[in-house]
Image: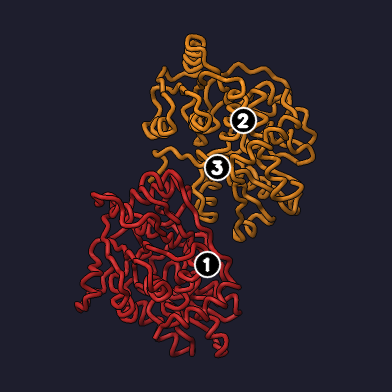
Chain colours: A orange, B red
Amino acid sequence: MATLNGIDKGYEFLANQLPATPILSSWTIDGMVGCKISFKSEHLQKTGSFKTRGALHNMRILAEKESKGVITHSSGNHGQAVAWAAHQFSIPCTVVVPENTPAAKIDAIEGYRARVVRCGNGIVDREETCDRLAKELSLDIIQPFDTVETIEGQGSLGLELRSQLGEIESLFVSVGGGGLAAGLALALPDTTLYLVEPQGKELRMQLDGSHNDDQSALDTIADGIRVRIIGDENKRILANHPKVHIITVSEEEIREALILIWTRLKQHVEPTAAVAFAGLRQVQMAASSPLPFSSTTVILCGGNIDTSFIP
Amino acid sequence: MATLNGIDKGYEFLANQLPATPILSSWTIDGMVGCKISFKSEHLQKTGSFKTRGALHNMRILAEKESKGVITHSSGNHGQAVAWAAHQFSIPCTVVVPENTPAAKIDAIEGYRARVVRCGNGIVDREETCDRLAKELSLDIIQPFDTVETIEGQGSLGLELRSQLGEIESLFVSVGGGGLAAGLALALPDTTLYLVEPQGKELRMQLDGSHNDDQSALDTIADGIRVRIIGDENKRILANHPKVHIITVSEEEIREALILIWTRLKQHVEPTAAVAFAGLRQVQMAASSPLPFSSTTVILCGGNIDTSFIP
């Protein structure tokens, strides 16, 4: 079970390996929204997303166990993060990617010295290939979002935030598999958490315990959080946090938030990172009275943009 | 005549008004280019470009002279910078813009409380309208790039760089009217300056003294430096600098450099800012032997992107 104690220990290690990512702000955006916003810049994290935290934390534990090699499946940020983290510990790494993965992403993974194995495009294909190779080659699997090691690694972001900003009153975060949200929930038990999701995810129903077998990807420009179902451990952690709000944003809201971050904050984040800010904008627009906070924190979770999204 | 002494005095004032913009770097880009690169982030400057330096320096001098109001003509960064700077000193400000200026840019100028006056689209229209209103309304004109006050203001960037990085061996800068390049040339007399221009500008011929009456705008995506002719004072300063190289980059080279800055450095700079980096890439590609420097500095001059340039 992931715990605050585990996050504390992970942070002790990670804080020495990864420089704290900067807190950015914009007077113009603060003026538009009507509160002081701290943007936590995980797009400037090593490999371009917060995923590096969980990957490096996993790798430290596996290095102690003298792992002979690791494997994971991901076409995106998790794959790059695992490849980089494994390279830091000189652990051989294999990343299973769907056949339709853009060449640029494969280049990035191979640039971190990992071996890339292509498989079919479905999530089931990916998992099966990954499991089969892990067994055949005796490799350790690095899960993307629902293991103790990953959640505790991502949770270091919460402790880092507190070391930079003091107590965090409220925080907006984009939710995919839920590993980052769960890590933050454990690390910041007194913070009001706004979990922001694209349409169709139905996170409220998931947290309320409705069972959902729909493994299909969400249809959203936020390509980092197309996974529909959050992990069971993440669901448990989030359902137990006393101050959780869920906000569902439209594609249009994500796009508007993205353009504001690009043009006002001048940060070239990926669409997934704009989901969190879109949630804050929705709260602001809906508020007939002042916002329920005078300052807040928005996680910019990544900056690895699909090149098809560039003019 | 602009002097290093004038830049020193300006910097004393500006350093208290404008926080130093950060120096950014990327291991990935350093690896690609083969040297250590310091990216100076003037896109994170107040109003989103280095123009704020010259504008604020002008305004301080005019405030001492108890100016009753200022006027300038610009559809871009200079207009926003002057509007903001005037507002800091509570000096009334008018900005003359061509009729085809996008609404977003007018909103930005008006957001800084300046009055916007529309005129015809030619450069002559703009100058005539500006001069006529200045005379009628007794306003002081803030020139965009070829006055002592503007050059000395932009030069503060060179002193700021030295306070952050120590001696600057070499530096790449995009050149339009030449105010920033001239300011840097005065501030950094021992630095090798790479002046980078879009095709068609023929800066070499201009510095060699060829007369050029062609006032037409350059056809380039680098919309901040479409002005073809550099100012006379700037020409004189640059022609006297002992270590000046001129590099001409194609539109394709600008676009490639822009995408690298967006995707690797994660900074949403404007195309004009990518011109300087495109120059460094060209030097790198052309080098049959190691680069002529082990480290260098690239100015990211602005981040105000035309919204038509967003997908």
Mark 2 or 3, nearer chain start = 3
User: Disc 3: which chain?
Assistant: A
**Disc 1: which residue:** B163
**Disc 3: which residue:** A45
x 47%, y 82%: residue:
B6
Q: Camera-side residue: A162 or B80?
A: A162
Residue flagged by tag 2: what amino acid is it? His
Tell me the number on the disc at residue A57. Answer: 2
Label 1's element? helix
User: Disc 2: which chain?
Assistant: A
User: Residue B167, how many percent across, how many down?
Assistant: 45, 66
Q: Quadrant of the N terminus of chain B?
A: bottom left
User: Disc 1: which chain?
Assistant: B
Residue flagged by tag 3: what amino acid is it? Gln
Q: Is residue B42 above or below residue A15?
A: below
Q: Is residue B296 above or below residue A241?
A: below
Mark-to-mark CA distance, 2 and 3: 15 Å
User: Residue B66, how many percent across, how many down?
Assistant: 57, 89
Label 2 crowd (10 A; few <14 / some 14-19 / many >=20): many
Mark-to-mark CA distance, 3 and 1: 26 Å
